[in-house]
Amino acid sequence: MDRDQMRASESDRQVVMERLRQAVEEGRLDVGEYQDRVDAAMRARVYTELDVLISDLQQLPPPGYQEASMEPTRELRPQSLSKANQQLRDSAEQRSSKWKIAGVAVAIAAVACLVIFLLSPELFLYIAIGVLVVLVLFVVAAFSGLF
C-alpha cells in the first residue's frame, strides 16, 4: 500500500500540530490560519491530508548555507569583559545570593512557627497578637509622620 493512502494515527496528527505551533511562533502563520490547519489536522484520515497542511512550512537552510562550511574556521575564545560589565555581573550574583539567604530565613521562620503552633497553640496565639500590635504601631507611626 502506498504511504499516501495509509491512515494517519493520533501521534502523527500531534506531530503535525506541533510543527504548526512552531510555525506560529516563527511568524510563518497567523493565528486564524493556524486554527484552520489544526482543525484540518484533527479531521485528517490519511498521510496525504497531513502532508498538505505543512508542505509550505518546510524549513529551508539559511541563505549562503553550504554543506562544506560546517567546520569551524577559527577557534572561539571568550572575550574579556569591560570593567563595567564585570561589576554588573558581580552585583547580579550578589543580589541572587541575598535572595537565597532571605528564602532560607523565611523557611526557617515558617518551620519555627509550625513547631511553636504544634507544641503550644496558646504561645503561638500570643506571639501572633504581639506581631500584630507591633505592625499596628508601625502603621500609626507612619501616619503620624514619625518616619
Image (tube, grey):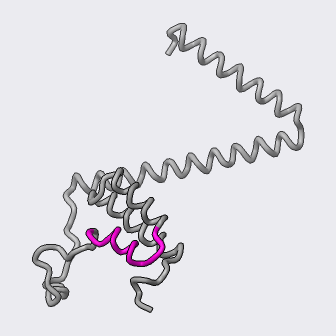
How many numbered marks appear? 0
Instruction: List x then y, in percent, for residue 139.
Output: 59, 16
Magenta range is: 44-56
Q: Nearer the viewer, residue 121 or 84?
A: 121
The residue drawn where x is 71% and y is 26% is 131
- Most common SS among magenta residues: helix
Instruction: Look at the image and tell me in which quarter the N terminus lies.
Output: bottom left
The vertical placement of 44 against 34, above or below, is below
Q: Nearer the viewer, residue 20 or 116?
A: 20
- In reply to whether residue 114 is colored magenta, the answer given is no
The residue drawn where x is 48% and y is 53% is 97
The vertical placement of 17 against 61, above or below, is above
Instruction: List x then y, in percent, for residue 5.
Output: 43, 83
- In reply to whether residue 48 is colored magenta, the answer given is yes
The image quarter in which residue 80 lies: bottom left
Is 107 on the left-hand or right-hand side of 128?
A: left
The residue drawn where x is 48% and y is 73% is 45
